[in-house]
């Protein structure tokens, strides 16, 4: 399991619960599938391969799925997504470019922000148009990016599913990427289970956390359960 530290580990069911995306759909995107005699390749290769023939996701895969699902939900075909990923990968030299912060939009088209050096060695910014159809990408992408912390290279570090005020964070460097309470660093599933079995005060005393942390975790896990049931 040491190789998974800082990577995260999710089954399609766990990823689907967090993202409100069908686990079957996630599996198709990452494994590829056949339909009416036609083979459709995976959108990208998953970060995690445990050698048991099953599909697993890392944290970067989780963030890629968020963006891909939004694009596809607004009518962009998986084939176009696959082509855009291939182009962006070549330009950015990133295996998972969808989850970076390099996307820009004018409200109609979506662009990739590329920094290049000219003949004099001076850097200049160029916008590469990935899609030419008329979509309101500004409304699609920007809210998703606001809940992610990025590193200096534009790669996602951690995700705040409810925003930072919600105090729930998904961080691949902690608890293998399972949702945790950001104040106490205890997994929300653990705190929520304690809260269901004990009173808030007793559960808080057992785990040495504020009662508010138990309450946050219970509310978050309940929301995830409702999503999974839809």
Image (cartoon, rainbow, N blue to C red):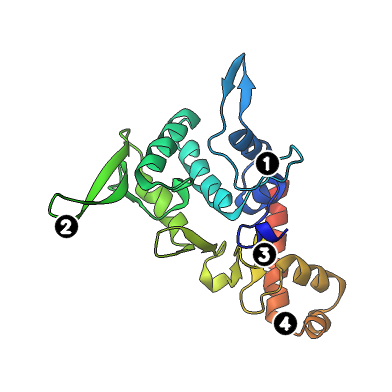
Q: CA distance from mark 3 to mark 2?
A: 48 Å
Can you tell which quarter of the image residue 74 is in? top left
- Verify CB contact (< 8 Å) between mark 4 and mark 3: no
Write down the residue under mark 1.
23
Q: Position of residue 201 (x, y in %)?
A: 79, 84
Q: CA distance from mark 2 to mark 1?
A: 46 Å
- Please give the count of numbered marks on the rendered protein: 4
Q: CA distance from mark 4 to mark 1?
A: 33 Å
Write down the residue under mark 2.
122
What is the secondary structure assignment of the residue under circle 3? helix
Relative to 69, say whether 132 is above or below: above
Write down the residue under mark 3.
220
Write down the residue under mark 4.
211
Give the mark nearer the N terminus: 4 vs 3: 4
Q: Position of residue 166 (x, y in %)?
A: 57, 70
Image quadrant occupied by the N terminus: bottom right
Q: CA distance from mark 4 to mark 3?
A: 14 Å
What is the secondary structure assignment of the residue under circle 1? helix
Q: Position of residue 55 (x, y in %)?
A: 69, 41
Of 100 and 105, which appears nearest the observer? 100
Tag nearer the camera, 1 or 3: 1
What is the secondary structure assignment of the residue under circle 2? loop
Tag nearer the camera, 4 or 1: 1
Q: Position of residue 215 (x, y in %)?
A: 71, 74
């Amino acid at each position: 399991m040491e190789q998974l530290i800082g990577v995260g580990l999710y089954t399609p069911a766990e990823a689907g619960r967090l993202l409100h995306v069908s686990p079957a759909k996630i599996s198709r995107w990452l494994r590829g599938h056949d339909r009416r005699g036609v083979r459709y390749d995976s959108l990208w290769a998953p970060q995690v391969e445990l050698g048991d023939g099953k599909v697993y996701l890392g944290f970067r895969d989780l963030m890629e799925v968020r963006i891909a699902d939004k694009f596809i939900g607004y009518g962009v075909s998986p084939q176009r997504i696959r082509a855009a990923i291939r182009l962006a990968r070549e330009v950015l030299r990133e295996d998972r470019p969808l989850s970076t912060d390099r996307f820009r939009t004018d409200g109609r088209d979506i662009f990739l922000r590329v920094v290049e050096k000219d003949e004099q060695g001076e850097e200049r910014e160029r916008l590469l148009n990935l899609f030419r159809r008329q979509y309101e990408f500004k409304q699609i992408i920007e809210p998703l990016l606001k809940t992610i912390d990025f590193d200096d290279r534009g790669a996602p570090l951690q995700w705040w599913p409810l925003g930072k005020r919600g105090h729930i964070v998904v961080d691949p460097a902690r608890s293998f990427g399972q949702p945790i309470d950001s104040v106490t660093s205890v997994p929300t599933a653990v705190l929520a289970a304690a809260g269901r079995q004990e009173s808030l005060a007793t559960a808080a005393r057992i785990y040495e956390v504020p009662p508010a942390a138990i309450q946050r975790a219970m509310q978050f896990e309940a929301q995830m359960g409702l999503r999974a049931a839809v």
